Amino acid sequence: MSTTHTQGQSHDRIPPIGEDGDGVGIYNGPPGRTAPDPDTSISQKMLSAVIGSLLTSLLVTPLDVVRVRLQAQPQESQRRTFNSTLDGLRKIARNEGVLTLWRGLSPTLMMAIPGNVIYFAGYDWLRTSKMSPIEGRVSDAYAPLAAGSVSRVLAAIVVSPIEMLRTRMQAVASKEKNVMRATMLGLKDMVGTDGYTSLWRGLTLTFWRDVPFSALYWWGYEYGRERLHEARARDSSISGQSRRDLTKSELLQDSFIAGAGAGAIAALVTTPFDVGKTRQQTVINSNMSAEQRRALPENRTMPRFLWHIYCQDGMSGLCKGWAARCLKVAPACAIMISSYEIGKKMAVTVNEKKELRE
């Protein structure tokens, strides 16, 4: 049986039609759609996402703290405080204690675990389920962009209040240990002044940041995985090898490289929106009058607020913290997607052994 190689963005978790070599279990549905994934349950995918979230949060939170500090402070203050990402890491550890670099870890985990479960499991469902709303409406080449965008919108809505808590905690330059309590009281005052909808402040800019990020990331990730798989197939003596046949080390290598590359590019492109979101979420207006709050630049629409930042600080203001963001996002994406893919592969192995015993 000749191996059919599907160009474009065939889903990298399920072999395209005929690619499993022996003809067993070949998907015979409509052309151009991705086959459903029968080998892992939704709970196993969720567990893989949780493990990836824990690893990612522990490893990259220090870079996130530096990113928030760089973006939240005024341009003139930045020149006196931090000269670079590494300088920020060193000064925060020296002046406020090493543990300050992990400030906001609790809300990060509270945000990352449900957010990534919705994001990754939702992406898989949108790409593989017959009930997916993008089924039959989006070509396979653009399905990663659509699925990534929709799943990110849902995740962002759910975790936005927790992200505001984390961002405000990380923006505080202090050795005090009651930062969480003080931040919670600040949020309480904000809700009392502006209502519960203020907990979703910055959500519009979050969409502007995360939706194009997710579209670029998933398209780049699947494109990169496809190219890496093609390169391995050319160098291998085994012809017609599908991605399901990759060893754990090969899967880890491909996922890590493609995830890091796609994440870094997507992070760089969307940094201006991240700067705007951070500024909106860290502004303190509880002591201002209603008229003063309305006059704040942070309350403007997204294009007008970003234009305000550009007029005040130039392009460097819009790209503030880009190095810290890329240094954080690239390994975070690599670790998260690698953990997720390896977790799913291990789940497949467990399920196959269970079926053999039965």
Image: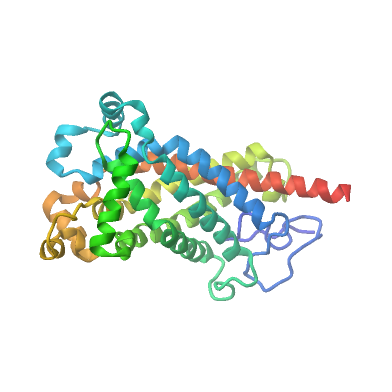
Which x, y percent locates residue 83?
Answer: 21, 32
Viewer-closest of 110 and 301: 110
Task: Name the one closer to the observer, 172 or 70.
Answer: 172
Q: Residue at x 48, y 40 (%)?
A: 56
Front one among 43 and 264: 43
Residue 71 visible in this rendered orientation of the protein: yes
Would residue 40 be found to the left or right of residue 274 on screen?
right
Above or below, comparing residue 297 to residue 322 in the picture:
below
Splitting the image into 4 quarters, where does residue 121 fall?
Answer: bottom right
Give how far across and how far down residue 325 sits, in percent: 34, 43
**Residue placed most toward the observer, 322 or 33:** 322
Total labels drawn: 0
Depicted 54 relative to depicted 296: above or below: above
Residue 168 can be seen in this image: no
**Residue 171 location (% of width, % of height):** 27, 42
**What is the quadrant of the N terminus in the image?**
bottom right
Q: Residue furthest top?
A: 94
Taking the view exactly as shown, the residue that stands out farthest to the right is: 358
Left or right of 209 on screen, residue 1: right
**Residue drawn at 29 percent across, 62 percent down:** 198
Q: Position of residue 319 (x, y in %)?
A: 25, 47
Identified at 34% across, 61% down, the residue is 200
Q: Residue at x 39, y 35 (%)?
A: 102
